[in-house]
Image (cartoon, rainbow, N blue to C red):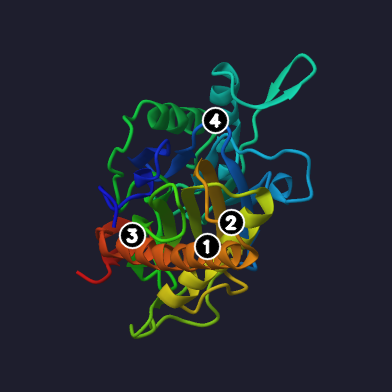
Amino acid sequence: MGATGAITDVAGIRVGHVQKSGDGWLSGVTVVLPPPGTVGSVDVRGGGPATHETDSLDPTTLSQTVDAVVLTGGSAFGLAAAGGAMRWCEENGRGFTVPGGLVPIVPAAAIFDLGRGGDFSARPGEAMGYAATAAAAGQPEGHDVERGNVGAGTGAAIGRGTYKGGVGTASLTLNNISKDGPVVVGAIAVVNALGLPFGAKAAQVPEPAPPLNTTLVVVATDAVLDKADCKRTASAAHAGLARALNPSHTLADGDTVFALATGAVALDRSTPAARQISLITLQSAAADVVRLAILDGISRAEAVTTAAGTLGAYGR
């Protein structure tokens, strides 16, 4: 575990939350702001995703770096928050260089929390995305990350809407895959899943389950990875989601994992075998840290009363 047990144990990673509750609201935005030059990719496995700009993270596409990742409530409507993060990045000189200016690369993904505060139209937009990005930029290096019902996890629920979900985070340090020193792997998760943690009794609600779910994850490391490595890391990290939640990756979930590599520490690639071992070890750790982040988010959730009734905190 790193210094804070958070994704921000990866040097240069910052996280900002903005949320609103009351007056019909129960939603928010979480922005992961990496250092300039961070490489990234994504793997979407849920059957009901709400995403923005994920195609640009395919290893075969032109852009290589990611300027920010937006996790938001509000389902597909909430993806408008990405526009605010893009505006902040443009104002601060971050983006893909094109003739006449910059185009920030800001992928986003959303959970379904519409109406949980009472007003279906109360959902994040451009202003909230800008504010969350600015909040991330204002954090000090290595800051702790607020967990529970904050940011994109404000209106999160699990177990077919029976219990509160929320934001969780974790980190691990690997000491044997680089000659340059330890490698840190961290994750942040927004848990709004149809399922429950393994071993929990399934929620007793009418079938079929409503399509109102999704778990969103950002994995970050300070290792040197290219875009294809990040893609494989995101894919491997989905194993942590499957270990934490039962069921996962369903038709009614939009489960999505982003992977970011800041490139500060070179992995051992002295031989083909060393390269394989270092990548497998890192990707195995990514799955482990995702599981820990998901369980952290669930354990820190608080019971709240919504327009649909009381959502109990799970595991308290």
Mark positioned earlier in the residue sequence (2 or 4):
4
Image disc number at residue 278 = 1
Give the position of the N terminus as an image quadrant.
bottom left
Image disc number at residue 252 = none
- Residue 143 to residue 298: above or below: above
Say which residue label 4 marks: 36
Mark positioned earlier in the residue sequence (1 or 4):
4
Find out whether the residues at labels 1 and 3 contact each other: C-beta distance under 8 Å. Answer: no
Q: Residue at x 56, y 64 (%)?
A: 274
Residue 23 place in picture, x, y as percent: 35, 40
**Which amino acid is tagged 3?**
Gly
Find out whether the residues at labels 1 and 2 contact each other: C-beta distance under 8 Å. Answer: yes
Mark positioned earlier in the residue sequence (4 or 3):
4
Q: Which of label 1 and label 2 is nearer to you?
A: 2
**Which amino acid is tagged 1?**
Ser
Image disc number at residue 297 = 3
Find out whether the residues at labels 4 and 3 contact each other: C-beta distance under 8 Å. Answer: no
Q: Specify whether residue 50 is in view.
A: no
Find out whether the residues at labels 1 and 4 contact each other: C-beta distance under 8 Å. Answer: no
Q: How would you rate the neighbour count of disc 4 (Cα within 10 Å): few for under 14, some for 14-19, many for 20 or more? A: some
